[in-house]
């Protein structure tokens, strides 16, 4: 699994499959890249909805690879 903080954007998590649990409900996420909000402005938290582009969010690029 790889996690990347995109330039001025979300945390991008590369994975094959993930289980998302919220309010006791489970959902399998099958997309290869999951974007998590780190600007705090998304209306679809914890996921990024592109709102970071409108709020002048700035953040460094950081990459983490889990082995
Ligand atoms: S990082 Fe994209 S909406 Fe917050």
Image (cartoon, grey):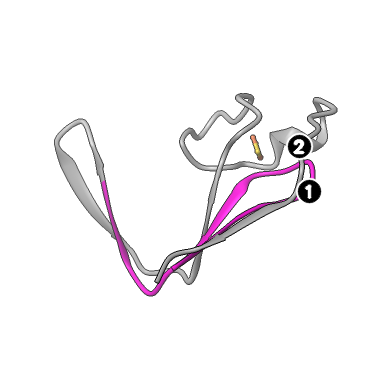
Residue 7: give its label: 1
The disc label shown at residue 50, or none: none
Please tell me whether mark 1 sits on a helix, a strand or a loop. Answer: loop
Which residue appears at 60% of the width and 25% of the height?
40
Please identify the quarter of the rendering in which residue 63 is found: bottom right
In the image, residue 40 sits, relative to residue 49, either above or below, namely above
User: Which residue is disc 2 drawn over?
Assistant: 59
Number of marks in the rendered image: 2
In percent of width and height, residue 15 lies at 42, 69
Query: What is the CA distance from the residue labelled 1 to the residue labelled 2?
Result: 6 Å
Q: Residue at x 57, y 38 (%)?
A: 37
Q: Residue at x 80, y 37 (%)?
A: 53
CB under 8 Å between callouts 1 and 2? yes
Q: Position of residue 22 (x, y in %)?
A: 25, 36
Within the magenta stretch, is there residue 17?
A: yes
Magenta stretch bounds = 1-20
Asked where in the image residue 67 lies, by quadrant, the reply is: bottom left
């Amino acid at each position: 699994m790889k996690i990347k903080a995109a330039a001025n954007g979300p945390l991008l998590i590369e994975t094959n499959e993930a289980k998302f649990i919220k309010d006791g409900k489970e959902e399998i996420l099958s997309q290869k890249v999951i974007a998590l909000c780190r600007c705090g402005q998304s209306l679809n938290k914890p996921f990024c909805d592109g709102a970071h582009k409108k709020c002048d969010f700035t953040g460094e690029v950081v990459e983490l690879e889990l082995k």
